[in-house]
Amino acid sequence: MKLLHVLFDSNQLSGSFPSTLQLVQTLEVIRLDRNSLTGPILFNFTNLPNLTELYLSNNKFSGSIPDLSGKNLLTYVDMSNNSFDASSIPPWFSSLQSMTSLIMERTQLQGPINATLFSPAQLQSIENLIKLILLTYADRVLSNNQLNGTLDLGTNYGSQLLLIDLQNNSIDEFAQGTRYSQELLLPGNPFCQKVQSSEYCIAPQQKNSSHATPTGNCVAPSCSAQQLPSPNCSCANPITGILQFRSFSFSDFQNGSYYILLQAAMMEAFKSDKLPVDSISLCAPSRNLRDDYLEVRLDVCPSGVYFFNRTGLSFITSQLNNIAFFVQTDAFGPFLFTLHTDKYFTGSNKSSNTGIIIGAAVGGSVLMLLLIMAGVYAFHQRKMADRATQQMNPFASWDQNKANGAAPRIKGVLSFSFEELRECTNNFSEVNFLGAGAYGTVYKGTLLTGVLVAIKRAKQGSWQGSHEFRTEIELLSRVHHKNLVCLLGFCYQSGEQMLVYEYVKNGTLTDCISGKSGFKLSWTKRLGIAIDSARGIAYLHELANPPIIHRDIKSCNILLDDQFIAKVADFGVSKPVDNNEAHVSTVVKGTLPTARLDMHGQAYFQSPETAYLDPECFTTGQLTEKSDVYSFGVVKTAMDNQRKKDSGNLNDILDPTLDLTKPLKGLERYLDLAIRCVEQLSANRPTMNEVEKELENIQQLAGFDNNVERVSTSTTYSETTEESSYHPYTKKVFFEYSGSFPHSEIELQI
């Protein structure tokens, strides 16, 4: 993955220009405009060979104007409204071969203008090239540092040069020479005071382009009030919204070729994702002067039908806001999509009175017939309108009259109908069964797009109230981390509550370390899995909003993908943390175990499928983030301890599938960390962030050989006897523990 765009515009950033950006040599676009950055720009832009767009306007930069010589890929530069030192026009202004827009308003340039400035072949605009610095105090205007002398465009200016804006400078003469036929703005110069009738001295008017991408070679049909003609000349109810581009690299908004290229790129992206799109239309481009964004209206028309169904709507709106859908166009750059409230499905459902008028004119029998026909027509129209509204509203089934509250406010999560999920699981067949738990049953499914998913279906008796279910969806839609199983969608229909998660290929950690999955994990790979799990849990504790306590950390809730990267699962019904409280009191979630804790440091349990509970929970009834740390410590022990044996010999309890013929680097520190995680007092346990850092240090010591071998699932683990061959961890010293636990066993029966 490469970082291409840094878009930090319109924030409240302060300080100096970030010099560390030169370490990211893949950067193509930098937007730091509209902040409060100060000081000189001591930055070597030659370290960014791929830079094409640079926005630094509306800050408080000082010192010299940065030297961009040799940056021949640059197409757009805006350094306006800064406090640079007064200087003449730098030579690099006219030397950059790909430059299309150069905006240097209020940057204290002064002196004469050389005709070579207008010669680059690609230059489209020199916009407001250093307006006079104006500071208004009551009735005084203070001027300082201005472009002056005679303006001479020469005869070799670029044919693509569409705009020259030199307003409010001190230009007193204009050598017209070969007549410049595009837009030249000179208001506010002494030249215009002497020649007031010049066309170049007229103040510009704001232009709004209504350009639209062309329609097909066909005749536009006559559509109903609730429909629009598509570019392919069919009537449809399109998805309508605004595309907002933050790093566009052109200024000629009326040039239709840009929008045609964007239209083709977006259609290609829709087709590659197999989305039911017939055509798209781009129109009404305008420049948002407040944020300096380009805004374009987008209409997406369905294929073969009048309107999109629920799945089509969800996929399209989700993809348009998904960075993976990013359409590569040099002129536009990345975009944001804002969906409009669709007005095409809110029209009147009143039936036509034409049939009644005709029926009244022809007599009783005909009147009755027409009334019947009018009634059928009205019923049909109402049904179609209701269906359209339901299809366009993913939460139409969220009945607010039954104390459900408002529909969830989510972004990037799909709403599925019960029929869709039943179809993709073959009617929830046994073949698709993955497992079952306290919450319900999990099935494997395949969406229409071919994406594999895991569908958790709540069983009777475990349903949440609608308010709790809505809160959970809103919470999970905001949780995104590569080491957490991702929520893709949900279903709240036909008396069902279902959550749709990404499908994780290699199953649970329980199956993997027990040999059921047919894989053999090396010592260093097990360390990697522990680090992945710690990162996911640390995210829940420290970065989720609000923070989340998992409460059910166990090896069967840690899943492994096709690269054996660990993903923590089943945090969906976890307990959010109130930031104003020091602890959380709650009913313990999951299956409660019978646990034996050896105070010499060994923890072993009845089953790896049970939850591991914090000892303090039994006395205080309180669960905290440190409760998750305790459970994680037991999981760490279970990863390398597959024989439940009360022994003082490490050789007797380590997983025999590990290569025990040589020392396992970092094992002592690993076990010490596990022991600290299961300290009886929560205050003595580390945080998950500290656990993650220590595991990373252990991984550095152990190395990065992430070996995974496929073995026969029929492999059995034999007990290692006292007379077994030499093992590097048979010394009793590795079991010495200096903690505060008494040297006895505590058995917790729940």
Image: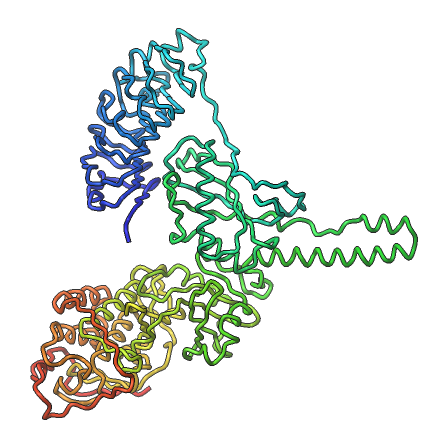
Quarter assignment of residue 69: top left
Q: Seen in the image, is 555 located left or right of residue 735?
A: right
Q: Give coordinates of residue 495: x percent, y percent.
A: 56, 72
Q: Seen in the image, is 681 located left or right of residue 412?
A: left
Q: Residue at x 56, y 40 (%)?
A: 215
Check the image and report above or below for 22 versus 405: above
Q: Give coordinates of residue 67: x percent, y percent.
A: 21, 30
Q: Seen in the image, is 426 located left or right of residue 2?
A: right
Q: Residue at x 91, y 50 (%)?
A: 362
Quarter assignment of residue 698: bottom left
Q: Give coordinates of residue 317: x percent, y percent.
A: 48, 53
Q: How many marks?
A: 0
In the picture, the quarter occupied by the C terminus is bottom left
Outermost residue on the top side: it is 194
Outermost residue on the front side: it is 217
Residue 607 visible in the snapshot: yes
Outermost residue on the right side: it is 363
Check the image and report above or below for 574 versus 300: below
Residues 550 and 561: in front is: 561
Q: Residue at x 32, y 64 (%)?
A: 540
Quarter assignment of residue 170: top left
Check the image and report above or below for 84 versus 552: above
Check the image and report above or below for 314 versus 92: below
Residue 135 visible in the snapshot: no
